[in-house]
C-alpha cells in the first residue's frame, strides 16, 4: 500500500504485483478508518441528541458510500482522474445568561458535526488500497467498501449511542476518560490508540509524501539527493531501496508533529475543523466535480442537480462545523 517516490501507482509503474484480495482491502480500510475519531462520538451524539445524532451518522455514511462508488469508477475507468485526485489528497457577553447558553449549545452542536465528519474522513486512503488489489480491482473494491462501510457505520452508531446512554449529557471528549476501572483494561485501550496512530498515519500521509516527492523530483531534475536510491542488502529478499530525500522528509514530518501536537490545547476543536473541511472538499466537492467532468454529465440533468445539491448541503454542514470549531479554538486561548 505504497506509492513510489515519483508518485506513480503500482498499477502504472509495474514495479510491484497487485495481489490484494477483498478481505485484505476491507481490513486495510477498517484498520485505518476506525481510530481516534471514534473516541469523540459519544459526546457528539450527546450534543446532537438521540434523533439528530444517529441521523447525522447515517447521513455521513450515505454520502461516504456515494463517494466510494464515484471514486472506484473514476479510478478504474479513467487514468486521467488519478493525478488530480492524488494531488487533492496530498496537497485541508452582551447577551443574557440564557442566550449565552443557547449559543454555546448551538456551537457545540455545530462542532459535533465536525467530529462526525472527521470520523468518516478516510477517503484519501482508498486510492492506495485499490492499487493493491488484483485486477479487475473495481469489482473487488465494491465489495470491500460495502463490507467496511457497514461495519464502520454500525460500530460508530453503537459507540455513539451506548456512550451517550452511559454518560448522558456529560459525555467526555474522549470517552475513555469517562472510565476509571479496570486500570489494566484502560491502559490496554490507550496503548491500542497509540499503536493505531503510529501505524495509520503512514497510510494517511502516503498521498502527501508522494505529492511532495514527485513535485521535488520534477523541479530539481538533476538532484542526486532527491532522485537517487541506495540499495541496502536484505538477507533472504530483494535489496531495500532507500531514498535519502524521502527519509529526511518523513523524519522531519514526524519530528514537527511530535513537537507541535502536545502544544495544541484545542486539539478536539482543531480535529473538528480539519474533519469538516476535509470531508466537504476531499469526500464530496472535488470528487463530485471530477466525476461530472470525466463523465461529461449534462448541466441541469437529474444526476447533475443531485450531485450539486449534495455538495451544497455538505458545504452548509461544513460552514456550521467550522464556525463551532473556530469558536471553541478562540475560547480555549
Image (cartoon, rainbow, N blue to C red):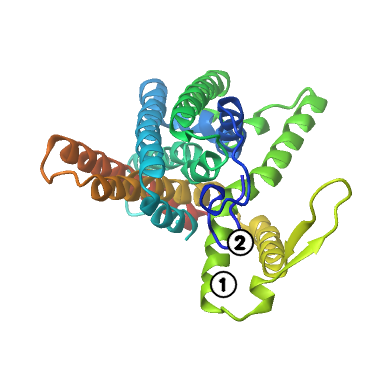
Does any portion of residue 44 appear in the rendered image?
Answer: yes
Q: Position of residue 271 (x, y in %)?
A: 52, 48
Residue drawn at (31%, 42%) of the image: 314
Drawn side of residue 33 relative to residue 292, left or right: right
Q: Position of residue 64 (x, y in %)?
A: 40, 34
Characterize the local packing of mark 2: few (<14), some (14-19) or many (20 or more) Cα atoms within 10 angstroms.
many
- Number of numbered discs overlaid on the protein picture: 2
Earlier residue among tags 1 and 2: 2
Q: With respect to residue 171, does 264 lie above or below?
A: below
Camera-nearest residue between 252 and 103: 252
Residue drawn at (47%, 40%) of the image: 115
Camera-nearest residue between 31 and 190: 31
Characterize the local packing of mark 1: few (<14), some (14-19) or many (20 or more) Cα atoms within 10 angstroms.
many
Q: With respect to residue 18, does 286 lie above or below?
A: below
- The residue most toward the bottom is 222
Q: Position of residue 99 (x, y in %)?
A: 32, 42
Residue drawn at (85%, 52%) of the image: 234
Drawn side of residue 182 relative to residue 275, left or right: right
Residue drawn at (72%, 69%) of the image: 244
Camera-nearest residue between 239 and 260: 239
Q: Which residue is mark 2?
A: 5
Drawn side of residue 302 relative to residue 238, left or right: left
Does any portion of residue 96 appear in the rendered image?
Answer: no
Q: Position of residue 268 (x, y in %)?
A: 54, 46
- At mark 1, the secondary structure is helix
Q: Which residue is mark 1?
A: 217
Q: Quadrant of the N terminus?
A: top right
Dots 1, 2 in contact, CB < 8 A: yes
CA–CA distance in space, label 1 to label 2: 9 Å
**Numbered badge on residue 141:** none
Q: With respect to residue 179, does 267 lie above or below?
A: below
- At mark 2, the secondary structure is loop
Amino acid at each position: 500500500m505504497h506509492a513510489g517516490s515519483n508518485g506513480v501507482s503500482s498499477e502504472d509503474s509495474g514495479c510491484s504485483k497487485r495481489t490484494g484480495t477483498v478481505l485484505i482491502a476491507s481490513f486495510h480500510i477498517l484498520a485505518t478508518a476506525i481510530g481516534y475519531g471514534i473516541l469523540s462520538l459519544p459526546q457528539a451524539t450527546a450534543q446532537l441528541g438521540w434523533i439528530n445524532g444517529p441521523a447525522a451518522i447515517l447521513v455521513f455514511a450515505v454520502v461516504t458510500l456515494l463517494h466510494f462508488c464515484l471514486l472506484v469508477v473514476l479510478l478504474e475507468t479513467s487514468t486521467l482522474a488519478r493525478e488530480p485526485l492524488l494531488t487533492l489528497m496530498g496537497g485541508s457577553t452582551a447577551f443574557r445568561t440564557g442566550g449565552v447558553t443557547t449559543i454555546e449549545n448551538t456551537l457545540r452542536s455545530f462542532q459535533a458535526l465536525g467530529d462526525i465528519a472527521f470520523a468518516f474522513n478516510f477517503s484519501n486512503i482508498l486510492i492506495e488500497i485499490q492499487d493493491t488489489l488484483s485486477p479487475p480491482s473495481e469489482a473487488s473494491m465494491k465489495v470491500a467498501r460495502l463490507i467496511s462501510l457497514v461495519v464502520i457505520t454500525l460500530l460508530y452508531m453503537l459507540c455513539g449511542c451506548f456512550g451517550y446512554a452511559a454518560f448522558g449529557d456529560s459525555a467526555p471528549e474522549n470517552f475513555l476518560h469517562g472510565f476509571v476501572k479496570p486500570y489494566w483494561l484502560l491502559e490496554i485501550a490507550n496503548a491500542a490508540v497509540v499503536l493505531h496512530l503510529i501505524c495509520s498515519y503512514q497510510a494517511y500521509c502516503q498521498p502527501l509524501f508522494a505529492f511532495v516527492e514527485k513535485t521535488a523530483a520534477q523541479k530539481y531534475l538533476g538532484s542526486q539527493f532527491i532522485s537517487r536510491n541506495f540499495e541496502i542488502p536484505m538477507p533472504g529478499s530483494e535489496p531495500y531501496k532507500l531514498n535519502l530525500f524521502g527519509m529526511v522528509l518523513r523524519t522531519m514530518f514526524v519530528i514537527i508533529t511530535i513537537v507541535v501536537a502536545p502544544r495544541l490545547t484545542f486539539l478536539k476543536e482543531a480535529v473538528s475543523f480539519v474533519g469538516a473541511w476535509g470531508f466537504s472538499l476531499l469526500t464530496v466537492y472535488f470528487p463530485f466535480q471530477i466525476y461530472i467532468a470525466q463523465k461529461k454529465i449534462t448541466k441541469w440533468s437529474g444526476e447533475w442537480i443531485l450531485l450539486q445539491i449534495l455538495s451544497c448541503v455538505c458545504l452548509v454542514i461544513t460552514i456550521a462545523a467550522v464556525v463551532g470549531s473556530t469558536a471553541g479554538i478562540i475560547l480555549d486561548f
